Image (cartoon, grey):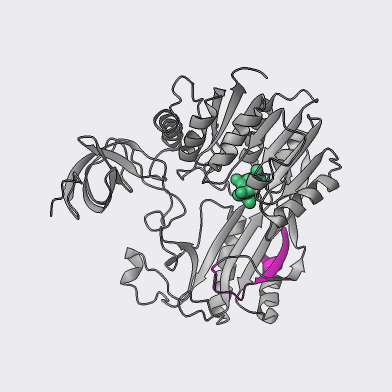
């Protein structure tokens, strides 16, 4: 049925030309001036697509057929790419991924933020296009999602999977024996755990039945000394089979730092337990960022691409232009890693962080590294900024995807630090916040950094200077 509010029909099929890529990974087509997002389509492609969701401003469509493929399209190197939610752009060469990430940042700033007269620098590329992640989380499932090849194969077990999610689903897990985003050693661990669990008859947890034992396998590998930590998350305590597994891992894979068992008895599907049992070795790995060596336990937050995290922090430091006399505020400080970099070149750093565990980690990290000029304020920073003294000369902010609360942005304008360094993992909310900051600040430099090759994710560092000094 046609509805004058929408330029497309519900479930209607259309032939569309894909112009570019959007944040989120989908191809962007236009019907007159109405935008249609087509997942899995690439720029330069003519596709047949069916409308699955329509709104007044845009629609989302499912790709049915590629009528004219893009010259940019390449065969994805990973055999799971078609079904797995881990990567979105393996069908694009890395150089093209970077070009589109730069375009996405530029267009968001222009169209959402009204920031036009600033150059968006070329994206700082990751040295590694694959095997760049220092952490991977795999899920167990009692209902394996079968790929097209597996559907007709009766020998494939249907009641066990250890792998990754089908995009946009919480319960559909495809069996993954090899993930290109992690190292070969981590893949060896993945295979051993999968084979062992099936051989020993350990039951995977069902997200619908809430029964079963094995929930997640989380692997962490240090880019610093290669130590690999294996964390098996289970629904209840039963250490004997896991101890046996730990021994096999230590025997068959070199440089295992430790094997731990987190126990999550709650229904919430998260890989964090209420209790942790050390099965063998150490309960942490060591990772190095700049001059700092951090101990990272199973449940601590840490940047997942170590090498690029260093580049990101170096960019923050360059943009902050610290002389050693400044008071610096680090908003959304996490475990205080940026704060520690800043503290080396500032008089004083105050980090603000909501998660109590992260605040404790941050304070401990600072203590261990003998950083005495950084302190951390816990709680929602919306309610902490006003009462905190001294006010900053330079402010660094690294909010979650949702960006900053509007009141926080307006408060920053009010206290007017002479420089702001905004680190963002979402160009859309970055642009929205910059639109407000632009009332007082000039956008000097925009540097995207690629932390996540093969995905649409992009980190952006922006340097802002006060238009009129206080
Ligand atoms: C993108 S992470 C920052 C990571 C950190 N800067 C780093 O490089 O490791 C965002 C952080 O903001 C924190 N956060 C989210 N909302 C917050 C709020 N309202 N007040 C304070 N911190 C908040 C989260 O707990 C999270 O640690």
Q: Identify the residue shown where x is 76% and y is 54%.
A: 360
Q: As rendered, which of 353 and 97 lies closer to the eye?
A: 353
Image quarter where the N terminus lies is bottom left
Total marks placed: 0
Q: As rendered, which of 136 and 461 lies closer to the eye?
A: 461
| Residue 26: percent from left, percent from top | 35, 45
Quadrant of res 293: top right
Residue 304 shows up from this direction = no
Quick check: is 204 in the magenta stretch? no
Q: As rendered, which of 294 and 425 lies closer to the eye?
A: 425
Q: Is residue 169 left or right of residue 412?
A: left
Q: Identify the residue shown where x is 59% and y is 43%.
A: 399
Q: As rendered, which of 189 and 302 lies closer to the eye?
A: 302
Q: Residue most toward the top?
A: 468
Image quarter where the C terminus lies is top right
In the depicted structure, whether residue 298 falls above or below residue 200: above
Residue 342 shows up from this direction = yes
Q: Residue most toward the left?
A: 1
Q: Identify the residue shown where x is 47% and y is 36%.
A: 432
Q: Is residue 90 left or right of residue 317?
A: left
| Residue 122: percent from left, percent from top | 50, 27
| Residue 333: percent from left, percent from top | 68, 44
Quick check: is 252 in the magenta stretch? yes
In the depicted structure, whether residue 106 falls above or below residue 117: below
Q: Identify the residue shown where x is 81% and y is 51%.
A: 364
Q: Is residue 161 left or right of residue 249?
A: left
| Residue 294: percent from left, percent from top | 76, 48
Highlighted magenta segment, given as a residue range: 249-269
């Amino acid at each position: 049925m046609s509805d004058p509010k929408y330029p497309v029909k519900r479930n209607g099929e259309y032939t569309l030309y894909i112009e570019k890529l959007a944040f989120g990974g989908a191809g962007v087509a236009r019907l007159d001036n109405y935008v249609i997002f087509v997942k899995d389509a690439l720029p330069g492609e003519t596709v047949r697509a069916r409308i699955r969701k329509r709104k007044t401003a845009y629609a989302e469509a499912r790709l049915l057929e590629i009528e004219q493929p893009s010259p940019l399209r390449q065969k994805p190197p990973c055999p799971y790419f078609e079904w797995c939610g881990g990567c979105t752009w393996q069908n694009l060469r890395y150089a093209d991924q970077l070009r589109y990430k730069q375009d996405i940042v530029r267009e968001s700033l222009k169209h959402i933020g009204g920031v036009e007269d600033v150059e968006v620098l070329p994206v700082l590329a990751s040295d590694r296009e694959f095997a760049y992640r220092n952490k991977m989380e795999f899920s167990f499932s009692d209902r394996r999602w079968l790929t097209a090849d597996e559907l007709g194969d009766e020998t494939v077990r249907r009641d066990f999977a250890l792998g990754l999610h089908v995009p946009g689903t919480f319960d559909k897990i495809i069996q993954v024996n090899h993930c290109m985003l992690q190292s070969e050693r981590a893949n060896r661990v993945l295979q051993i755990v999968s084979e062992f669990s099936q051989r020993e008859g350990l039951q995977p947890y069902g997200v619908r039945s809430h029964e079963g034992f094995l929930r997640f396998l989380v692997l962490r590998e240090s880019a610093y000394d290669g130590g690999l930590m294996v964390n098996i998350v289970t629904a209840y305590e039963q250490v004997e089979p896991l101890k046996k597994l730990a021994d096999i891992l230590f025997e068959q894979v070199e440089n295992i730092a430790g094997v731990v068992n987190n126990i999550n008895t709650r229904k919430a599907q998260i890989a964090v337990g209420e209790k942790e049992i050390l099965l063998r070795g150490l309960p942490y790995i060591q990772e190095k960022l700049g001059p700092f060596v951090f101990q990272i336990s199973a449940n601590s937050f840490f940047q997942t691409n170590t090498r690029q995290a260093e580049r990101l922090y170096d960019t923050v430091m360059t943009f902050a232009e610290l002389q050693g006399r400044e008071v610096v505020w680090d908003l959304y400080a996490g475990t205080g890693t940026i704060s520690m970099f800043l503290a080396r070149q500032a008089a004083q750093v105050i980090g603000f962080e909501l998660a109590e565990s992260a605040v404790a980690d941050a304070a401990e990290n600072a203590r261990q590294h003998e950083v005495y000029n950084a302190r951390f304020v816990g709680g929602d920073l919306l309610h902490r900024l006003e009462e905190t003294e001294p006010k900053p000369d330079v402010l660094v902010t690294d909010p979650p995807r949702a960006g900053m609360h509007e009141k926080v942005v307006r408060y920053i304008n009010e206290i007017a630090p002479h420089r702001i360094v905004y680190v963002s993992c979402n160009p859309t909310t970055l642009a929205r916040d910059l639109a407000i900051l632009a009332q007082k600040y000039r956008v000097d430099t925009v540097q995207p950094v690629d932390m996540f090759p093969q995905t649409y994710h992009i980190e952006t560092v922006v340097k802002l200077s006060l238009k009129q000094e206080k």
